[in-house]
């Protein structure tokens, strides 16, 4: 049996692990946005992983969440969020909800978050957990995220958290002027993280650094065979 004290102790332990995570994995790698650091200190990451991984939730690594998918490494969540340069008023779209952790972090830094997940079971789990934890400005949708979520477009920020063969034009089309889209582009193993900015009548892009994500599926994504055989972009 667990008493109320046991739960309080666990909450304190997890909170201490989060503070340590931010200090040792995020700040030392050059992320200093206080709002972002506070969001990472507050979102209970362990709740977004299967119970057997609760104690590993704050390690410097991605972890399996079932159905062949992963929760991203904390630093990856931090750096991708940082690239959106959110100030609190933005409408944000995420492709690849997974467990919902990235969406929860975004919810603390933006006005609303639309997030689209391909696998219905994951979408349902994430939606349930985000509601339970009170992240009311996140809306989880099931479907092929390469189509974006036109109903709420345009977006000030779009994050793709799965590896795309190329930047989907549909997503660029849903970017507001001044908006930023962050997307890993490439095949199995290593991809390049790209940022696209919608400036007056143009989309400018920069390639940042190497990352490693699970494949984007669906119409603009990878087939199993192509994902297995595609060489790394770098
Ligand atoms: N954002 C997550 C990590 C997601 S892993 C986090 O917070 O840790 C990538 C997710 O993208 C997987 O759940 C996968 O099912 C999903 N995905 C793959 N292709 C997709 C598509 N076309 N549309 C929406 N989601 C997709």
Image (cartoon, rainbow, N blue to C red):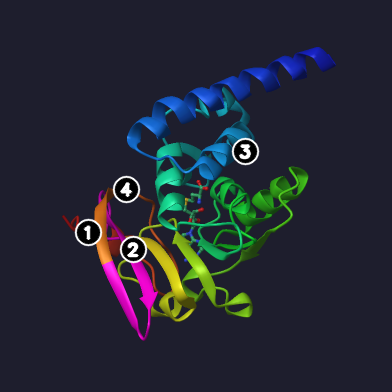
Q: CA distance from mark 2 to mark 1?
A: 26 Å
Secondary structure found at label 2: strand
**Residue 159 visible in the shown view:** yes
Tell how many labels.
4
In this rendering, the answer to whether 123 lies above or below 13 is: below
Tell me if mark 4 has few (under 14), some (14-19) or many (20+) residues whose alpha carbon lies within 10 angstroms of its own: many
**Circle nearer the N terminus (2, 3):** 3
Tell me if mark 1 has few (under 14), some (14-19) or many (20+) residues whose alpha carbon lies within 10 angstroms of its own: few
Residue that numbered label 2 is attached to: 195
In this rendering, the answer to whether 220 lies above or below 117 is: below
Q: Residue furthest bottom?
A: 201
Q: Which mark lies nearer to you, 2 or 1?
A: 2
Residue that numbered label 4 is attached to: 212
- The magenta-colored residue range is 185-205
Q: Residue drawn at (83%, 17%), measured in percent from left and top?
A: 4
**Residue 99 visible in the shown view:** no
Tell me if mark 2 has few (under 14), some (14-19) or many (20+) residues whose alpha carbon lies within 10 angstroms of its own: many
**Circle nearer the N terminus (1, 4):** 4
Circle 4/circle 3 CB separation < 8 Å = no
Q: CA distance from mark 1 to mark 4?
A: 16 Å
Secondary structure found at label 3: loop
Residue 43 — which label?
A: 3
Circle 1/circle 4 CB separation < 8 Å = no
**Circle nearer the N terminus (1, 3):** 3
Q: Residue drawn at (37%, 61%), measured in percent from left and top?
A: 183
Q: Please tell me which residue lies in front, 164 or 10.
A: 10
Magenta: main secondary structure equals strand
Q: CA distance from mark 1 to mark 3?
A: 37 Å
Q: CA distance from mark 4 to mark 3?
A: 23 Å
Residue behind label 2 places its C-beta within 8 angstroms of ligand 1: no
Q: Please tell me which residue lies in front, 72 or 31.
A: 31
């Amino acid at each position: 049996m667990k008493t109320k004290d046991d739960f309080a102790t666990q909450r304190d332990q997890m909170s201490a692990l989060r503070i340590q995570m931010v200090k040792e994995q995020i700040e030392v790698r050059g992320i200093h946005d206080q709002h972002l650091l506070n969001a990472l200190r507050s979102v209970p990451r362990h709740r977004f992983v299967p119970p057997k991984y609760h104690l590993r939730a704050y390690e410097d690594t991605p972890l399996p969440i079932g159905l062949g998918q992963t929760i991203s490494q904390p630093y990856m969540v931090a750096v991708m969020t940082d690239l959106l340069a959110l100030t609190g008023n933005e409408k944000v779209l995420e492709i690849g909800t997974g467990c919902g952790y990235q969406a929860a972090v975004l919810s603390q830094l933006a006005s609303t978050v639309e997030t689209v997940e391909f696998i219905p079971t994951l979408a349902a789990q994430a939606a349930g957990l985000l509601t339970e934890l009170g992240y009311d400005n996140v809306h989880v949708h099931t479907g092929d995220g390469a189509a974006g979520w036109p109903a709420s477009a345009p977006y000030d920020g779009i994050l793709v958290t799965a590896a795309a063969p190329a930047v989907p034009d549909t997503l660029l089309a849903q970017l507001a002027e001044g908006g930023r889209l962050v997307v890993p582009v490439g095949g199995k193993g290593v991809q390049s993280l790209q940022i696209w900015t919608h400036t007056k009548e143009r989309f400018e892009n920069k390639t940042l650094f190497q990352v490693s994500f699970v494949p984007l599926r669906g119409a603009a994504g990878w087939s199993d065979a192509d994902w297995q055989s595609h060489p790394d972009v770098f």
